[in-house]
């Protein structure tokens, strides 16, 4: 099922903008860029464009990386801002006019209302999500129910409102929009349908990474969701700022890299949330995903011998809790 980029309503915004589908096929350098959106796609695109030396601004309506841990999301935004990416927070674009010299004048206004402002750029990149192309399937004719965005409503076993029809991947409502997730869900569905398997896809412990300039890896619940699920009194967060060995010589990333484990105290400190910012975060996260699926506790992490000096080792030496109020900064490598 194909999903098309979603566009902002307003004169010229669709006609004069590009999406992440187009950014690698431009016929000329993008020049000064305005990225609209706060998704991982928006921040990843903004990150590499700024890294290539282009004047890049991100326009954010509300929060960064909705659905992800907000402490981590804000740390990513702070890091990007410190390294050249500009942010316009609390604004939405309302129109885009192409000028005689080919540049784009984008008009935007505060989300809460107020006086409109303008910015002139060479490239307008919209990264505000995608919409599924389900409308051409006439699913309503056979009773398949959709959500308000046009995604197909499914049960935990990928079954739709019509018992013999299943939906997997990005088209399924409230499911993670990641290719490996769709592949795994498809394999498990096929095994249930044709090999008498009982195994269903677990969406709660899917490892994921955001490839922003400060890489982010996550498994399980955000701190906000953990508190909502288990109650603040039942949550303990172990955390630390750390500095990768390779950054000591270069004198970089003094306080930027950060890791935290969110634990359920009521269940022997089972780790329900894993979050890391820093180099190779995706690689580190993939490795620990197996332990998380097996119900690893904080003690399991503590009893694991770390490989020195690696980033992953930081997960085996966490001893500072948020509740203690102690400084999370660590000395040495």
Image: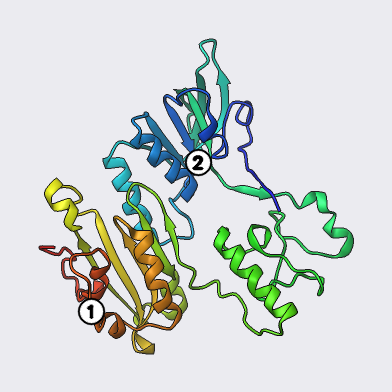
> Could you tell me which residue is drawn at 38 percent across and 41 percent down?
47
Relative to 287, is 117 on the left or the right? Answer: right
Q: Residues within 10 Å of mark 2 (few under 14, many from 20)?
A: some
Regarding residue 292, the answer to whether it shows in the image is: yes
Q: Label 1: how many residues lie within 10 Å, few (<14), some (14-19) or many (20+)?
A: few
Question: Between disc 2 and disc 1, whose residue precedes?
Answer: 2
Q: Identify whether 85 is placed above or below 211.
A: above
Q: Quadrant of residue 306?
A: bottom left
Residue 252 appears left or right of 312: left
Q: Which of the two residues, 82 or 257, is positioned nearer the viewer here?
A: 257
Secondary structure category for the residue under label 2:
loop
Determine the residue positioned at 82% across, 71% down. 162
Q: How is the image coloured?
A: rainbow
Q: Is residue 329 left or right of residue 229?
A: left
Residue 216 in picture, x, y percent from top left? 37, 57
Identify the element where label 1 is drawn. loop
Q: Write the residue at 26% across / 81% down.
A: 304
Please say whether residue 175 is visible from this viewpoint.
no
Q: Residue 328: image x %, image y %?
A: 19, 66
Q: Are marks 2 and 1 in contact (CB under 8 Å)?
A: no
Q: Which residue is mark 2?
A: 111
Say which of 143 and 283 sits in front. Answer: 283
Q: Position of residue 180 (x, y in %)?
A: 55, 62
Quadrant of residue 87 in the image?
top left
Q: Which residue is mark 1?
A: 305
Which circle, 2 or 1, is nearer the viewer? Answer: 1
Work out whether 9 lies above or below 68.
Answer: above
Q: Position of residue 12 (x, y in %)?
A: 62, 26
Q: Which mark is residue 257?
A: none
The part of the image, by quadrant, that contains residue 280 is bottom left
Figure disc tally: 2
């Amino acid at each position: 099922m194909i999903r098309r980029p979603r566009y902002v309503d307003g004169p010229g915004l669709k006609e004069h903008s590009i999406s992440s589908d187009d950014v690698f096929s431009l016929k000329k350098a993008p020049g000064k860029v305005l990225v609209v959106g706060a998704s991982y796609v928006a921040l990843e695109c903004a990150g590499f464009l700024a890294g290539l030396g282009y004047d890049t601004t991100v326009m954010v309506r509300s929060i960064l990386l909705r659905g992800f841990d907000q402490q981590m999301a804000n740390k990513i935004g702070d890091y990007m801002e410190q390294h050249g990416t500009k942010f316009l927070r609390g604004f939405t674009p309302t129109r885009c006019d192409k000028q005689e010299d080919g540049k784009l004048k984008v008009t935007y206004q505060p989300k809460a209302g107020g006086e409109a402002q303008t910015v002139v750029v060479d490239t307008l990149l919209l990264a505000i999500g995608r919409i599924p192309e389900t409308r051409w399937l006439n699913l309503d004719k056979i009773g398949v129910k959709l959500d308000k965005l046009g995604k197909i409503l499914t049960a935990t076993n990928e079954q739709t409102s019509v018992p013999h029809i299943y939906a997997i991947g990005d088209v399924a409502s409230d499911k993670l929009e990641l290719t490996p997730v769709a592949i795994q869900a498809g394999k498990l569905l096929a095994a249930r349908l044709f090999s008498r398997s009982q195994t269903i896809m677990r969406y709660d412990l899917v490892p994921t990474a955001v490839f922003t300039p400060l890489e982010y890896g996550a498994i399980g619940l955000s701190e906000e969701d953990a508190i909502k699920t288990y109650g603040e009194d039942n949550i303990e967060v172990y955390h630390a700022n750390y500095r990768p060995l390779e950054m000591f010589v270069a004198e970089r990333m003094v306080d930027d890299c950060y890791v935290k484990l969110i634990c359920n105290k009521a269940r022997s400190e089972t780790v329900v949330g894993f979050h890391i910012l820093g180099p190779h975060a995706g690689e580190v996260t993939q490795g620990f995903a197996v332990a998380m699926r097996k119900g690893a506790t904080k003690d399991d992490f503590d009893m694991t011998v770390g490989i020195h000096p690696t980033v992953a080792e930081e997960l085996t030496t966490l001893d500072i809790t948020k509740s203690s109020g102690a400084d999370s900064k660590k000395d040495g490598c």
